[in-house]
Image (tube, coloured by chain):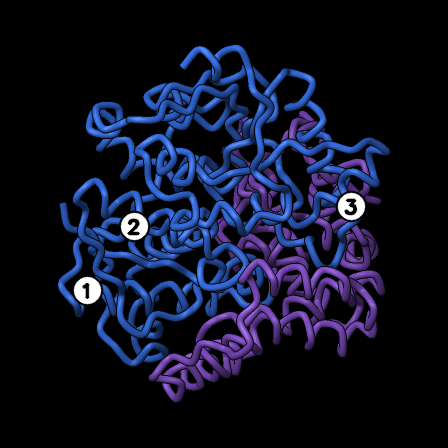
Chain colours: A blue, B purple
């Protein structure tokens, strides 16, 4: 399989292990990634707050660059990026009268034909292969955290179920993990308030860390850089808010799959987390 | 209210929202599901359903009350409300529009300053380099918000983990980014 690749800004910096593990896992599964050349930021959670046209033009430039390179399908692992790309593409499809102005802003023709996919969709297609190639089953109890942007708004993303989604649960089962039942799968972590309103992030993320622990999870698995940085980089604020010390790690789904495929943990960026990825020996793990 | 008319009344904020976003506020029948599911609803002075109720009435003083509220700046665009709304009202889109008008009229809530500083620093970073440079974003935010000491302890830890780049990633077509910003933001 060949697929276009839009890493996005977080994957170059604070979430580079998401980029490393995505590339490592997809390479191991024989997927060839073609990075969109000279890509720009999608505008994420800031552009739409300040200027609607900007929030259309930034993703449109990325899509136009992909079209120029003959890319028909783009993987955007970051949930915010894939959401912004989809939103802009759909708005321009519904309002073709806006395209001329957008083309003038980006200085390129725009068709909006490339299909945008998230990481769970791509991994989902490879699930049988992943299960067959699993050499080190990830025998842990997992709280699957989908967050907001992968599943909402359903009319834009049209992916899985907006309440109680299942795709990541099925994926971790394929590599030997046991998903826990929990109600925080799609609750907001506080998203872009990480820097400006850390108090709100500590409260919202605190609720879900506490519940994951209460339900016996060994690890929280995510597919969004913002979710990960709030659960990992902000853990000291979370623990301070809760008045409890929680060492439950947060891992990207690609890291979990990479470990199960027997890939080198360092190549998956496991060492980059603030909350160390260490597990107590459980009955299930020692039975392996 | 703007229902029953093909031409929204631009004298009211509800009418301008309809003209600008296509969202009809009259569709809201006050079930309260948006406020119940909102992760920051308990922090808001006006939760989404109350914002909608005030705007439905179409009085200038109530429009202004909404424009001056703090709650509109707390919306995280998590889309829980719009996903659960039985009328499929796109509430975060309305919040974006209201914030824009509050800024234009210079009556945004004082507590919006830090949040705005962050978004402006974010967009400045993209305008000059094409991609978000996280180190620059945080430095710029500190200067704008004057929260100089916030998170200073986090940076060295992130650096050790290889999560902070020392230099921004510059895209090649930076003049194209300038044009893009001028043609969108420049229109005000």
Q: Is circle 1 on the same chain as circle 3?
A: yes
Q: Quadrant of the C terminus of chain A?
A: top left
In the picture of the structure, the residue carrying the numbered disc 3 is: A237
In the picture of the structure, the residue carrying the numbered disc 1 is: A67
List x then y, in percent, for residue A261: 30, 33
Q: Quadrant of the N terminus of chain A?
A: top left
Q: Which-is-in-front pick, marks 3 and 2?
A: 3
Q: Nearer the viewer, residue A177 or B76?
A: A177
Q: Which-is-in-front pick, marks 1 and 3?
A: 3
Mark 3 or 2, nearer chain start = 2
- The chain letter under disc 3 is A
Q: Residue at x 49, y 42 (%)?
A: A149
Mark 1 or 2, nearer chain start = 1
Q: Residue at x 82, y 73 (%)?
A: B148
Q: Nearer the viewer, residue A148 or B44?
A: A148
List x then y, in percent, for residue A280: 60, 23
Which mark, residue A30?
none
List x then y, in percent, for residue B115: 72, 62
Rendering quarter of residue B114: bottom right
Task: Mark 1: give few (<14), some (14-19) or many (20+) Cα within 10 Å.
Answer: many
* Label 1 secondary element: helix
Q: Is circle 1 on the same chain as circle 2?
A: yes
Whole-number angstrom distance, CA of label 3 to CA of label 2: 33 Å
Q: Along the horizontal axis of the image, is A259 left or right of B95? A: left
List x then y, in percent, for residue B40: 74, 40
Q: Nearer the viewer, residue A248 or A3?
A: A248
Q: Is residue B19 visible?
A: no
In the picture of the structure, the residue carrying the numbered disc 2 is: A75
Mark 1 or 3, nearer chain start = 1
């Amino acid at each position: 399989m060949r697929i276009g690749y839009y890493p996005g800004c977080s994957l170059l910096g604070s979430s580079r292990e998401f980029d490393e593990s995505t590339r490592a896992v997809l390479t191991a599964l024989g997927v060839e990634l073609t990075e969109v050349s000279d890509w720009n930021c999608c505008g994420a959670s800031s552009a739409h707050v300040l200027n609607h046209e900007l929030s259309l033009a930034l993703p449109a430039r990325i899509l136009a660059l992909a079209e120029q390179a003959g890319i028909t399908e783009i993987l955007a692992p970051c949930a915010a990026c894939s959401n912004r790309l989809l939103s802009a593409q759909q708005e321009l499809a519904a309002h073709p009268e806006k395209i001329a102005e957008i083309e003038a802003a980006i200085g390129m023709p725009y068709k909006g034909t490339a299909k945008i996919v998230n990481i769970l969709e791509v991994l989902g297609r490879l699930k049988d292969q992943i299960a067959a190639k699993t050499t080190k089953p990830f025998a842990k109890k997992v709280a699957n955290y989908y967050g907001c942007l992968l599943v909402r708004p359903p009319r834009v993303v049209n992916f899985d179920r907006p309440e109680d989604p299942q795709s990541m649960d099925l994926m971790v089962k394929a590599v030997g993990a046991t998903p826990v039942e929990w109600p925080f799968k799609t609750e907001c972590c506080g998203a872009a308030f990480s820097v400006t309103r850390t108090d709100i992030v500590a409260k919202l993320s605190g609720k879900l860390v506490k519940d994951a622990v209460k339900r016996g999870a060994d690890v929280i698995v995510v597919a969004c850089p913002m979710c990960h940085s709030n659960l990992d980089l902000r853990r000291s604020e979370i623990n301070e808010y809760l008045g409890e010390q929680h060492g439950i790690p947060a891992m990207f789904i690609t890291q979990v799959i990479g470990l199960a495929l027997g890939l080198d943990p360092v190549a998956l960026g496991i060492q980059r987390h603030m909350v160390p990825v260490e597990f107590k020996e459980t009955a299930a793990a020692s039975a392996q | 209210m703007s229902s029953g008319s093909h031409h929204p009344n631009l004298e009211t904020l509800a009418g301008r929202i309809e003209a600008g976003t296509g969202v009809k506020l009259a569709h809201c029948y006050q079930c309260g599901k948006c406020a119940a599911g909102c992760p920051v609803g308990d922090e808001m002075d006006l939760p989404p359903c109350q914002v909608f109720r005030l705007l439905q009435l179409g009085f200038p003083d109530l429009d202004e009350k909404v424009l001056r509220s703090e709650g509109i700046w707390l919306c995280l665009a998590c889309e829980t409300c719009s996903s659960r709304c039985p009328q499929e009202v796109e509430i975060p889109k309305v919040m974006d529009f209201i914030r824009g008008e509050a800024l234009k009229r210079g009556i945004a809530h004082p507590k919006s300053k830090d949040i705005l500083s962050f978004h402006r620093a974010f967009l400045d970073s993209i305008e000059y380099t094409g991609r978000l440079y996280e180190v620059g974003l945080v430095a710029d935010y500190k200067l704008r918000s004057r929260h100089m000491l916030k998170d200073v302890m986090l940076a060295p830890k992130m650096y050790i983990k290889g999560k902070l780049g020392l230099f921004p990633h510059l895209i090649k077509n930076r003049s194209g980014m300038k044009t893009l910003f001028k043609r969108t933001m420049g229109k005000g």
